[in-house]
């Protein structure tokens, strides 16, 4: 069985030219060569306009087909191009994963009057006012779609809160009042800011039966229309965990039993992630924010960071079966709200730590592979990532042995299996150049090993006892394989 690898097929600053679905489709042969098994696509739904990255969701039933919010296509292209991309990915045995944004709706079609309580932004449990009437853009009629596929209309009572009072032209966090209204139950939501139900725009009320039914109807339509094979669930710490676990369970029970799912639960502490997994009956994996933050800290602290603790507090350390490991994504790149960009010098090391190990399912970031242009530009790491991904596909198998015995220099070996009989030895340093004495096995006595990444030019021979002294340059990573190996 080939090792799994996700690629996130977008970054925040892609041009809004409507060509991205076609660009990704053209890259499929390259993705196959890298060993990509799942492709995480950006949100395909109509947002606030042509420049919307996809998280300002307006209409889940418009995949770039109707003239709404000033455009027919989305930032990435048309519905037909999206469907063609999904079909091509499936033909290439790459699972297409859709980015699903359920938490909120943006850019309502008309204003409505209703009562709210203005809440303290730092403590959403603390009221700043009594209930009073405002106007909000909470009416969604989708006139451009005119009832096609689904005729549901959204109103103020389908939401829990919003951030703009159109009557008084004021911003804030407004909790909508009324029968069975209010934030999600504290036990079902993240407790940051007292209750982190509200994130942005018009916040969906996942207690409302009409909201639940509409999202179930949409999921059936979307899966059957597109043939998508997986969901990446956005911002789940802001969504009622009971709703999420029943939503996923209902899809797998009634629509698609083999739906692949992982969620973005943006917390960096291990206990919170494990608690959420328990609350959702471990139905889906989570992105490993704790590991990303460890990479971020290591990249900024340099040799002062203890590499033997690099996995401490991460989800992959405690639940490798439910961890999606990553170095960077669209939220952490420069200029974004969760900016925590890993320093360039450490990125090859960080990718080695997720791609060349067997725990977790790694995700490769589009911006790291292709580079990023504009005000927040970043170099491409394509050259080293090509090598790391091919190593993952060909050599990361069998018994894994760790040599985490020095604060600035760690190593591990993957000793291979029947289908992949050749060993791999990985070493990295965040300080000076270093070396490790690692066991390769008697079957390889006298064989010459080379650094496939090309960072060390010398060749090393396995000693008579089956051990090998592997080396690494300062602040670098090396991956030693038999010289005879060819990928």
Image (cartoon, rainbow, N blue to C red):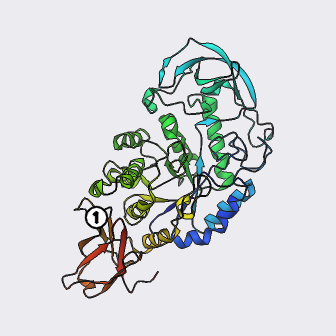
- Residue pictured at 76% horizontal, 33% vertical: 141
Q: Is residue 286 left or right of residue 102?
A: left
Q: Residues within 10 Å of mark 1 (few under 14, many from 20)?
A: many
Q: Is residue 467 left or right of residue 191?
A: left
User: Where's residue 68, x and y in %?
Assistant: 78, 42
Q: Is residue 297 visible?
A: yes
Q: Is residue 333 left or right of residue 437?
A: right
Q: Is residue 1 visible?
A: no
| Residue nearer the viewer, 231 or 375 | 375
Q: How many marks?
A: 1
Q: Secondary structure at mark 1?
A: strand
Q: Quadrant of residue 210?
A: top right
Q: Quadrant of residue 483?
A: bottom left
- Residue pictured at 73% horizontal, 53% vertical: 79
In the picture shown, does residue 137 fall above or below 433?
above
- Is the N terminus in the top left, top right, bottom left or bottom right quadrant? bottom left
User: Where's residue 105, x and y in %?
Assistant: 65, 35
In the picture shown, does residue 416 fall above or below 203?
below
User: Where's residue 369, x and y in %?
Assistant: 54, 64
User: Where's residue 50, x and y in %?
Assistant: 73, 47
In the picture shown, does residue 16 fall above or below 161?
below
| Residue nearer the viewer, 384 or 79 | 384
In the picture shown, does residue 206 fall above or below 441?
above
Q: Is residue 346 left or right of residue 164?
A: left
Q: Residue furthest top?
A: 130
- Residue pictured at 59% horizontal, 31% vertical: 203
| Residue nearer the viewer, 385 or 81 | 385
Q: Which residue is mark 1?
A: 410
| Residue nearer the viewer, 284 or 439 | 439
């Amino acid at each position: 069985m080939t090792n799994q690898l996700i690629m996130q097929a977008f970054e925040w600053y892609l041009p809004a030219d409507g060509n991205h679905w076609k660009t990704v489709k053209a890259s499929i042969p390259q993705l196959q060569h890298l060993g990509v098994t799942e492709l995480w696509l950006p949100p395909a739904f109509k947002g606030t306009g042509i420049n919307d990255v996809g998280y300002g969701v307006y209409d889940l039933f418009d995949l770039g087909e109707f003239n709404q919010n000033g455009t027919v296509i989305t930032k990435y292209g048309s519905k037909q191009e999206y469907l063609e991309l999904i079909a091509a990915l499936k033909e290439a045995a790459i699972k297409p994963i859709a980015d699903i944004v359920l938490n909120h709706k943006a850019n309502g079609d008309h204003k409505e009057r209703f009562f709210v309580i203005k809440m303290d932004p730092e403590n959403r449990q603390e009221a700043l006012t009594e209930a009073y009437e405002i106007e909000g853009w909470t009416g969604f009629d989708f006139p451009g779609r005119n009832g096609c596929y689904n005729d549901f209309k959204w109103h103020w009572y389908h939401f829990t809160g919003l951030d703009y009072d159109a009557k008084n032209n004021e911003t804030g966090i407004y909790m909508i009042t009324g029968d069975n209204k209010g934030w999600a139950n504290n036990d079902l939501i993240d407790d940051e800011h007292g209750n982190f139900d509200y994130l942005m725009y018009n916040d969906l009320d996942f207690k409302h039966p009409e909201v639940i039914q509409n999202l179930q109807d949409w999921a059936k339509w979307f899966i059957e229309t597109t043939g998508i094979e997986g969901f990446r669930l956005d911002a789940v710490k802001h969504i009622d965990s009971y709703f999420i676990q029943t939503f996923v369970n209902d899809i797998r029970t009634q629509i698609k039993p083999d739906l692949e799912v992982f969620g973005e639960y943006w917390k960096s502490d291990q206990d919170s992630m494990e608690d959420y997994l328990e609350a959702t009956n471990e139905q889906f994996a989570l992105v490993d924010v704790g590991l990303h933050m460890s990479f971020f800290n290591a990249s900024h602290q340099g040799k002062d960071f203890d590499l033997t603790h690099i996995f401490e507090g991460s989800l992959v350390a405690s639940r490798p079966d439910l961890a999606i490991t990553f170095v960077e994504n669209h939220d952490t790149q420069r200029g974004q709200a969760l900016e925590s960009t890993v320093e360039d010098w450490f990125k090859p090391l960080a990718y080695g730590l997720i791609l060349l190990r067997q725990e977790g399912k790694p995700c490769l970031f589009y911006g790291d592979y292709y580079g990023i242009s504009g005000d927040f530009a970043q170099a491409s790491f394509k050259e080293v990532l090509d090598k790391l991904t091919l190593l993952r596909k060909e050599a990361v198998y069998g018994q894994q042995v760790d040599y985490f015995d020095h604060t600035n220099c760690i190593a591990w070996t993957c000793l291979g299996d029947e289908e992949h009989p050749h060993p791999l030895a990985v070493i990295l340093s965040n300080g000076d150049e270093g070396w490790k004495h690692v066991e390769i096995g008697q079957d390889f006595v006298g064989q010459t090993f080379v650094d496939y990444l090309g960072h060390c030019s010398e060749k090393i021979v396995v000693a008579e006892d089956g051990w090998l002294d592997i080396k690494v340059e300062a602040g670098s990573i090396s991956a030693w394989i038999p010289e005879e190996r060819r990928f």
